[in-house]
Image: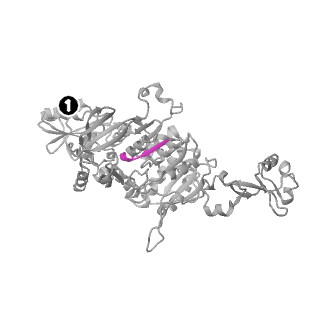
Amino acid sequence: MDGEERGPRAMGAIRLEWDGKSAEVPRLRLPLQTVETVNSPRADRGTLFESSGDDGGDGWRNRLIWGDNLHVLASLADELAGQVDLVYIDPPFDSRQDYKVRIAVGDGGAAADQDLAKLSSVIEEKAYRDTWGKGVDSYLQMLYQRLVLIRELLSDRGSLFLHLAPNVSHLARVLLDEIFGADNFRAEIIWKRTTSHTSTQDFGPVHDVIACYSKSDSHLWHPQFEPYEQDFVDQYYRYDDGDGRKYWPGDITAPGVRRGDSGKAWREFDPTSKGRHWGVPYADLDTLDAEKRIYWPKRGSGFPMLKRYLDEMKGMPVGDVWTDIKRMNQMAQERLGYDTQKPEALLERIIKSSSDEGSVVLDCFAGSGTTPAVAEKLKRRWIAVDIGRFAVHTTRKRLLDIPGCAPFTVANLGRYERQVWQQATTGDVVRAYLDFVVQLYGAVPVEGFSHVHGNVGSRAVHVGAVDAPVSMEEITDAVDDARAAGYVAVDVLGWEFDMGLHELVQDTARDRGVDLRLRRIPREVMDPRVVASGEAVFHELAYVKVDTALRNSSVEVRLVDLRPTQSRVGAGVGPRQDHRLGRLRGLLGGRLHLRGRGRLRRQQRRHLPQPVAVLPHAS
């Protein structure tokens, strides 16, 4: 290596190599955009009071971030390098199950059996390909880049817990040794997550591996305990003075001769004669005896012993084999439908062991949000990142269900990421950007118009800017421009749209005799691999329409219309989805009653207008 460093530290002689290994880590540091501030008092939003109170007075606010964790980690480096005390990550194993979510529909009875699986979005499928597309080589490169950035974010007392499947744990251990240093290995935790599997050829796989590494020797550590096994209690805690308190007579001395009080004789018992010293302060011996906490052997000249009461013991120190934490089952209250969801008890043990109240806890593969949820309950600060929009929505809802949840922000890289992408892809030439998006949409670029940038068949196409939401005025101009050119239909493509314009702009288009469709430009068009594959999907802007009525102490909310997110370029609603939509009809129709402090209850009303339902997309 010629004395140079590779990655975060000087590497030893043993390194893991794979096809395509690159020590280069992308460091696109972009400012995070706040999309929403959740749970902040409405009167304080946008005022000086917004950064006080629940944030501890130092301006901190927990964050839920949607985006590629590689870019997000790099973007957090300037602010949080050396400040994160704990990172837990559970990267996808070699299974598409990691991107599958089950959604329960209905309130009970037959409706409770309506269980739908959310299909992976294009960006989630891309994440799968990036991770496993070239086998384990892809996985290791993905992991390497993120571990380098994670190590930079960790404080000197910080630790990483990396959740792994047995099929890759041996490789990840070598990779972790390379990045963190073998001397910073702390534990390889075996979590028995399920009962035995039947296998005709091999031992049944019943465990996951959690590799634990620290950044330095001064890592945070709080021992955790589990209840004693009954056999252990029966064998050792079998003494009772008649008060019902079980105890175990244990040594009151410790190995080694000491000078001073701890080596003095007490009541004719001299620990020095046995090569030992008192294990409790000499001045406390009489007090302990008066409190009947000294056990005096009934025979001969045995040394006194200290009564160790069972009800005062913390339990057995937890080792590196965890069999007491069960996996999520179908009936678990905390279950949210993620097939790979981890139990809160698992994260509770990890967070308690390696962080303090107020520590920053990071999970950049947040999934169903178990890490931030447990961190919130344990009064830790947290940052959660996920590439899936549905995961972010699920985590947000889960956090809001926690009583007294501290305010947090929902953020993404937004227009900054898009601006960098535009500069790198098409440069400063606006026309090049417009043509690129038009062609990606499957349309043909056209010139000579102010607001029509292409056409697909008889439909005109307008493309919005990367750094601003599409406005009502912009859409109206595009409709007028298209109508003047003889088009009777317009597709408006935008990264973002102004709030609340859908129904108004549709009325405007209908008045002009134009069929209007609003479609989102997916962020995955910024990935050249998706562009090359032709898999970018432009989803139609969805909206929901409700009527509300005040009924005494409750608000009645009636679902009037739900416009689904139809899509273009290989992701239309096919027969499989149509079948599922049929199962949903009627289940979502009904009245929603909002009572008390915001609890929502649905009463089925099958005679109400049937809404159109759609499976949620995560892109």
Determine the residue located farthest toward the front in the rendered image: 242
Magenta span contains residue 389: yes
Position in image of residue 30 (x %, y %): 43, 38
Foreground residue among 185 and 553: 553
Foreground residue among 514 and 269: 269
Query: Is residue 604 shown left or right of residue 359?
Result: left
| Scheme of colours in the image | one colour
Give residue 447's quadrant in the image: top left
Foreground residue among 191 and 549: 549
Residue depicted at 35% across the width and 48% down the height = 527
Q: Which residue is mark 1?
A: 477
Position in image of residue 25 (x %, y %): 47, 48
Give residue 397's quadrant in the image: top left
Query: Is residue 522 shown left or right of residue 318?
Result: left
Mark 1 surroundings within 10 Å by alpha-carbon count, few (fewer than 14), some (14 through 19), many (20 or more): some
Query: Is residue 98 shown left or right of residue 211?
Result: left
Q: Is any part of residue 306 visible from this angle?
A: yes
Foreground residue among 182 and 591: 591
Q: Which element carries disc 1, helix, strand or loop?
A: helix
Question: Which region shows up in magenta?
Answer: 382-391
Q: Quadrant of the N terminus?
A: bottom right
Residue depicted at 51% across the width and 58% down the height = 172
Callout count: 1
Q: Amino acid at mark 1?
A: Asp
Residue depicted at 28% across the width and 37% down the height = 557
Q: Is any part of residue 431 visible from this angle?
A: no
Magenta span contains residue 560: no
